[in-house]
Image (spheres, grey):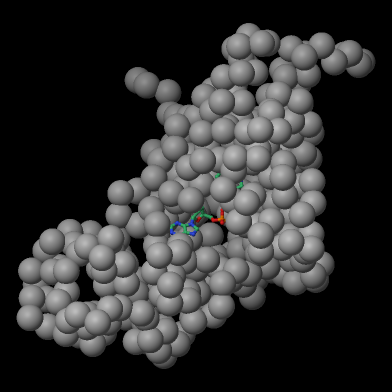
Amino acid sequence: MEEKKTIFSGIQPSGGLTLGNYIGALRNWALLQNEYHSYYCVVNLHAVTVRQEPAALRRRTRETAALLMACGIDPNVSTLFIQSHVPEHAELTWALSCNTYMGELMRMTQFKDKSARHSDNINAGLFTYPVLMAADILLYMTDLVPIGADQKQHLELTRDIAQRFNGVYGDVFTVPEPLISKTGGRVMSLQEPERKMSKSDPEDTFISLVDDPDTIRRKIKRAVTDSESEIRFDPENKPGVSNLLNIISALTGESTDDICADMAGQGYGTLKTRVADVVIEALAPMQAEYKRLIGDKEYLMKVQSESAEKAAYLAQKTLRKVQKKIGFAARL
Ligand code: TYM
């Protein structure tokens, strides 16, 4: 029998999670967990590359872990842990940083975007962020990384770093592959459908995973479409309508062609009602479970601590191997 492969993915606890996170990543994580050894990480070290309020960061870290569980990630099946609980992530980052070129990091579009948005705080961590992401992935000998399309460039860099390191020091790391879903790999902003839906944009542009049905309806009703009236899938010329069609398709499994055929002759108002219905229905069970879990702080803490221990076991093993290969002195 073939050995189970390993998947790893991470999510930042910065702000509420969005429908984009759900469709692009979280729901796939839950689907994949039985098929693979799965490591899912709330990446609070990444979050502090932009200024965070400490109490809010602590709260959101717990909320994010609870949301992941509410999305179906079962801590008895997957290892669901907090990045700062496994210090090997930061330690491997150093070794990888010494094998990553400035030029490579300067080409990262997320760095360019974020430094434009936070021009008062272009810190070194923001610059080396992709190296920390590479360390996350490589510590667990990951085969596959389920992500949204926006993280593809970071994954390509991870592969380059792993291959370079293996070339110099011998086979240490597994070289990971990205896993990006065809529908839903990029959910767009409701107000500016040429941009991806992002939690760091204004409220009206995204659906939060904890929005109530009225809020979801209101936001979708206000979503930008176009001046035509035909429901047609054409991301280039009709980005708003196409984004709405994509959301339905990703959540129901129907193809965009079938949805268009089904809705032929109807107006954008009907399309929006359909989107809202589908989103509300998809999120309802998750929201109910989240409400239950978030009150159970003791259970959440127990999961975090047990999972950190499981993750640390493999992380320490990999790090020791790396240290030995590099030539760091052994200690008794
Ligand atoms: P983050 O926290 O921004 O997003 C978490 C996941 O959600 C996906 N995503 C989207 N997918 C589709 N449409 C959208 N609008 C959308 N917005 C977000 C992201 O692609 C991601 O998969 N650097 C990463 C976190 C990270 C990581 C890792 C991921 C740190 N270490 C190791 C994978 C492996 C990030 O900021 O994701």
Quadrant of residue 248 within the rendered picture: bottom left
Vertical placement of residue 114 versus 294, above or below: above
Q: Quadrant of the C terminus?
A: top right
Q: State whether residue 29 appears in this view.
A: no
Q: Position of residue 290 (x, y in %)?
A: 53, 72
Between residue 133 and residue 330, name the one nearer to us: 133
Residue 110: % across, % down: 59, 51
Q: In this view of the protein, which residue sits in the foreground, 320 or 113?
A: 113
Q: Is residue 209 left or right of residue 213?
A: right
Q: Quadrant of the N terminus?
A: top left
Q: Residue at x 61, y 26 (%)?
A: 161
Above or below, 178 against 207 in this view is: above
Q: Residue at image x 43%, y 29%?
A: 4
Name the residue rendered at 66%, 64% in the picture.
Answer: 117
Residue 174, x across and y down, in percent: 54, 23
Residue pictured at 48% horizontal, 76% vertical: 205
Residue 181 at x, y = what percent? 35, 48
Left or right: 312 as drawn, with respect to 79 = right
Identify whether 98 is placed above or below 192: above
